[in-house]
């Protein structure tokens, strides 16, 4: 019931003006989709995921872009957003509710944003958050291959990012593009996905809590594939531990659209 009420209120908050769709469209890159061997089998056993062609934002959303969104959708200012949509750390690194300041540079990826706020931003671009399968599929690429996960050097490169101190200032977006023309999927920030809390359980898992939730998570962990792909498994574990209102200093997002 609490989640249903939150979604109803979210619909009201989304009722603001949208950003210029033409300008946002140029930021999305086409990905072909197809059959994909995920760390989370589609049937919980061995079945591959099947993805339709889609478009993905080439870069994570920046502080400057999210500031423009907040100014045009003031209901998402940190001093106005209801607690049911974001925790008390929401955009707390900004100097003011409508000002970035020295701790939040314009080209850095925006962080400390809840799932609700990220979804609202994507709606303003006539888009949505990517599903886990879409994100995992895109993040499997490197500069020359659509799926580089079997390469130990690729896995080591992703893991080396996890080893960096998390209290360092985030670099700006704009890393080297992969074969799809998408940047910064690995090595900059963690990213929200649309189905973040239904990845290891069922689509109704957001209603589950307490000891039963731990049982579902344990069963989901056993069914994971590609145990050698530890970097991706860590991302699944982190996302599955979140609530939609949570914000962290290294969690951002990007948006997706159907082709």
Image: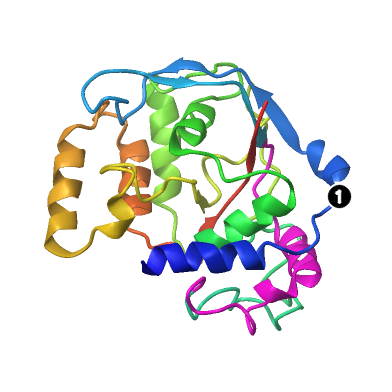
Q: Is residue 155 visible?
A: yes
Residue that label 1 marks: 20
Total numbered circles:
1
Q: Nearer the viewer, residue 84 or 148?
A: 84
Q: Quadrant of the N terminus?
A: bottom left
Can you give x and y, in whole percent of width and height, for residue 234 in the image?
32, 45
Q: x, y (%) of residue 66?
A: 72, 62
Q: Position of residue 98 (x, y in %)?
A: 76, 78
* In the image: residue 222, left or right of residue 102: left
The magenta segment: 57-86
Front-most of 123 and 235?
Answer: 123
Question: At x 52% / y 40%, what residue is drawn?
Answer: 186
Q: Is 194 within the magenta?
A: no
Decide which of 74, 110 is in the foreground and name it.
74
User: Closer to the camera, 11 or 75?
Assistant: 11
Q: Residue at x 72, y 45 (%)?
A: 126
Q: Is residue 205 above or below residue 142?
A: below
Q: Which x, y percent locates residue 217?
A: 20, 48
The quarter holding residue 166 reads: bottom left
**One can see residue 169 in this view:** no
Q: Is residue 150 above or below residue 184?
A: above
Rendered residue at 58%/78% (across/down): 92
- Model colouring: rainbow
């Amino acid at each position: 019931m609490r989640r249903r009420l939150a979604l109803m209120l979210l619909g009201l908050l989304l009722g603001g003006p949208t950003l210029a769709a033409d300008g946002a469209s140029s930021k999305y890159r086409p990905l072909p989709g197809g059959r994909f061997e995920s760390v989370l089998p589609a049937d919980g056993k061995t079945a591959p995921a099947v993805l339709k062609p889609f478009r993905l934002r080439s870069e994570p959303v920046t502080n400057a872009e999210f500031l423009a969104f907040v100014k045009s959708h003031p209901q998402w200012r940190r001093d106005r957003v209801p607690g049911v949509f974001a925790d008390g750390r929401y955009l707390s690194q900004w100097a003011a509710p409508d000002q970035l300041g020295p701790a939040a540079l314009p080209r850095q990826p925006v962080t400390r944003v809840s799932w609700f706020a990220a979804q609202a931003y994507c709606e303003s671009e006539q888009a949505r958050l990517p599903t886990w399968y879409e994100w995992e599929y895109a993040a499997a690429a490197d500069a020359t291959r659509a799926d580089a996960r079997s390469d130990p050097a690729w896995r080591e490169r992703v893991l080396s990012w996890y080893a960096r101190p998390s209290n360092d200032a985030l670099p700006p977006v704009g890393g080297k593009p992969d074969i799809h023309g998408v940047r910064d999927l690995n090595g900059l920030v963690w990213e929200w996905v649309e189905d973040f809390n239904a990845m290891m359980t069922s689509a109704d898992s957001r209603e589950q809590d307490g000891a039963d939730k731990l049982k579902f998570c344990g069963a989901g962990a056993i069914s994971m594939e590609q145990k050698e792909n530890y970097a991706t498994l860590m991302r699944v574990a982190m996302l599955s531990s979140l609530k939609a209102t949570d914000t962290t200093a290294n969690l951002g997002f990007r948006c997706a659209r159907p082709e």
